[in-house]
RNA sequence: GCGGGCGUAGCUCAGCCCGGUGAGAGCACCAGGUUGUGGCCCUGGGGGUCGUGGGUUCAAAUCCCAUCGCCCGCCCCA
């Protein structure tokens, strides 16, 4: 046990894990580009106030999970608990909505929440997300969901389900919340302590409760659908139909309300049975009021985010590429090996050479362990003839190869 | 924030209940067996303040307390 450990809930990504991360990042980039989305990067630190405005002062994120601190100048700052608020802030701050009425954006980076760590839940975690600003129409909801589903598919993740719901317009929601407050108010004392609290703050979240004592009431509670106007209903139906038609495994979940306060209309979560308690690996929805609440123009928007660590848990493992294509081993003067490895690198090969002056046997063992297919052995006798030995580790065949022809031989051997 | 399980070598773990016999195994690592050749095998080697701190005791990996971390559930979400 070392004297210093990484901070609780914050993890190193070791070299052996990086190929998986890089593959994931490559898929993010490729699929985003295919959908015409542009990357945006924003700071890890924002004013704490930003999240009170966006995520909502009653959300769990703000109430108990946000890393907040005062900087040396006395400013109240926060490590971002999610990335949407920063993206919206950036767009408004730089007046991007005056330049274009539609923006398709994606982001990728770390976020921070002070929670009790668990599998798939860390204090520093990573999110990939995409946001579409400027369209109030269901087509944009669908585009965002299809983008997410394309990434999931490209990663080889098949065991998942997309849960969909709608929260309607703010007015419809307000009336519904009123109805819920009234309904649950009658049975207040029978509810779980937590739900009693939510009754004041955010009655919608009672629907999300898993306390057994709440279940009978939740089942009888008014449903939002009855409070929706035809426009809202039509919007949701179009989203459902299109997503279903695209072959995505969908399930409408009327209980899905999500923890962020800024959503309107469509909300969704990607869930997988393989994840245990944290079964959601992605989620999002429409947030038509957020841009305006940040002082920007009235611009409708939809977006979603993936939890990168959770995607990694779901991804099938990939075969690993060897770190090098050729290993230069030497018996004798090490400078010769240096010369040969430089020649190979100059020709564009990924080539490594022993740096510990170990025995030839140890060098070959190392090459084998690294999975390198070809070894160039710089031997005394061959060197005097101006050549080296090329050895294939797959079957042990080897031959002498004049130095000027080395690249050509290597190319030939590697292309097989 | 609440409940539970677990921390012994780089990794997976045994030993702990019933305190005392030099702190172990497998894998991994290094070297030799082949004085210029990997994988298999054989031999040898390095590596641990038994998570940390305190207490009980003649004696603690083993018993007690605290603390930190990991894991699982609740909660919440990505």
Image: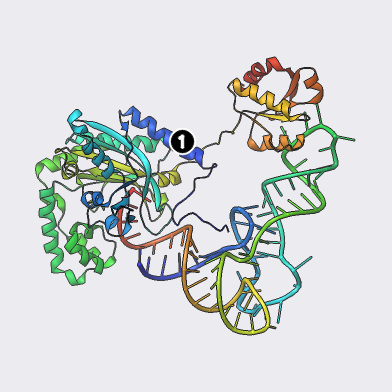
Q: Position of residue A85 (x, y in %)?
A: 26, 44
| Color style of the picture | rainbow
Quarter of image, res A311: top left
Quarter of image, res B36: top right
Element under disc 1: helix
Identify the image quadrant of the C terminus of chain A: top right
In the rendered structure, the answer to whether residue A303 lies left or right of residue A412 reads left
For the question of whether residue A369 can be seen, the reply is yes
Residue lying farthest front? A73
In the rendered structure, the answer to whether residue B55 lies left or right of residue A259 reads right
Tell me if residue A410 comes above or below residue A170 in the rendering.
above
In the rendered structure, the answer to whether residue A114 lies left or right of residue B59 reads left
For the question of whether residue A245 can be seen, the reply is no
Q: Residue at x 9, y 45 (%)?
A: A229
Tell me if residue B21 comes above or below residue A203 in the rendering.
below
Q: Which residue occupies the foreground of this view, A340 or A410?
A: A340
Quarter of image, res A386: top right
Q: Which residue occupies the foreground of this view, A182 or A56?
A: A56
Q: Position of residue A177 (x, y in %)?
A: 14, 56
Chain letter of disc 1?
A
Identify the image quadrant of the N terminus of chain A: bottom right
- Disc 1 marks which residue? A23
Tell me if residue A338 comes above or below residue A296 in the rendering.
above
Q: Residue at x 42, y 57 (%)?
A: A117
Q: Position of residue A39 (x, y in %)?
A: 33, 33
Crowd class of label 1 (few under 14; some 14 to 19; many from 20; radius 10 Å): few
Q: Residue at x 34, y 32 (%)?
A: A32
Q: Position of residue A236 (x, y in %)?
A: 18, 41
Q: Which residue occupies the foreground of this view, A21 or A215?
A: A21
């Amino acid at each position: 046990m070392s004297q210093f450990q990484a901070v609780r809930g914050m993890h190193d990504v070791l070299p052996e894990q990086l190929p998986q991360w890089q593959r994931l990042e490559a898929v993010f980039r490729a699929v985003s580009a295919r959908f015409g989305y542009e990357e945006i990067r924003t700071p890890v630190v924002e004013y704490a106030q930003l999240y009170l405005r966006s995520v909502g002062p009653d959300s769990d994120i703000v109430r108990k999970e946000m890393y907040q601190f005062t900087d040396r100048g006395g400013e109240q700052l926060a490590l971002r608990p999610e990335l949407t608020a920063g993206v919206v802030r950036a767009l408004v701050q730089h007046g991007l909505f005056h330049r274009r009425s539609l923006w398709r954006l994606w982001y990728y980076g770390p976020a921070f929440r002070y929670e009790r760590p668990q599998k798939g839940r860390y204090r520093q975690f990573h999110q990939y997300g995409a946001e579409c600003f400027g369209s109030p129409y269901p087509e944009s909801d669908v585009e965002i969901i299809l983008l997410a589903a394309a990434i999931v598919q490209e990663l080889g993740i098949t065991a998942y389900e997309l849960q969909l719901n709608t929260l309607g317009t703010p007015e419809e929601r307000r009336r519904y919340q009123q109805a819920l407050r009234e309904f649950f108010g009658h049975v207040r004392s029978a509810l779980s302590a937590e739900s009693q609290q939510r009754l004041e703050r955010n009655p919608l979240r009672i629907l999300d409760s898993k306390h057994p004592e709440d279940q009978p009431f939740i089942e009888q509670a008014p449903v939002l659908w009855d409070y929706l106007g035809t426009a809202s209903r039509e919007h949701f139906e179009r989203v459902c139909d299109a997503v279903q038609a695209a072959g995505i495994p969908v399930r409408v979940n009327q209980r899905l309300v999500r923890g962020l306060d800024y959503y309107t209309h469509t909300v969704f979560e990607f869930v997988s049975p393989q994840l245990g308690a944290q079964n959601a690996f992605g989620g999002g929805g429409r947030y038509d009021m957020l841009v305006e609440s940040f002082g920007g123009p009235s611009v409708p928007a939809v977006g979603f985010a993936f939890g990168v660590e959770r995607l990694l848990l779901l991804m099938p493992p990939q075969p690993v590429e060897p770190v090098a294509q050729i290993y230069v081993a030497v018996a004798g003067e090490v400078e010769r090996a240096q010369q040969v490895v430089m020649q190979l690198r100059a020709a564009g090969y990924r080539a490594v050479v022993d740096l510990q002056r170990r025995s030839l046997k140890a060098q070959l063992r190392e090459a084998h362990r690294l999975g390198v297919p070809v070894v160039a052995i710089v031997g005394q006798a061959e060197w005097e003839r101006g050549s080296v030995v090329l050895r294939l580790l797959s079957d042990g065949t080897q031959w002498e190869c004049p130095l000027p022809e080395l690249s050509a031989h290597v190319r030939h051997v590697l292309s097989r």
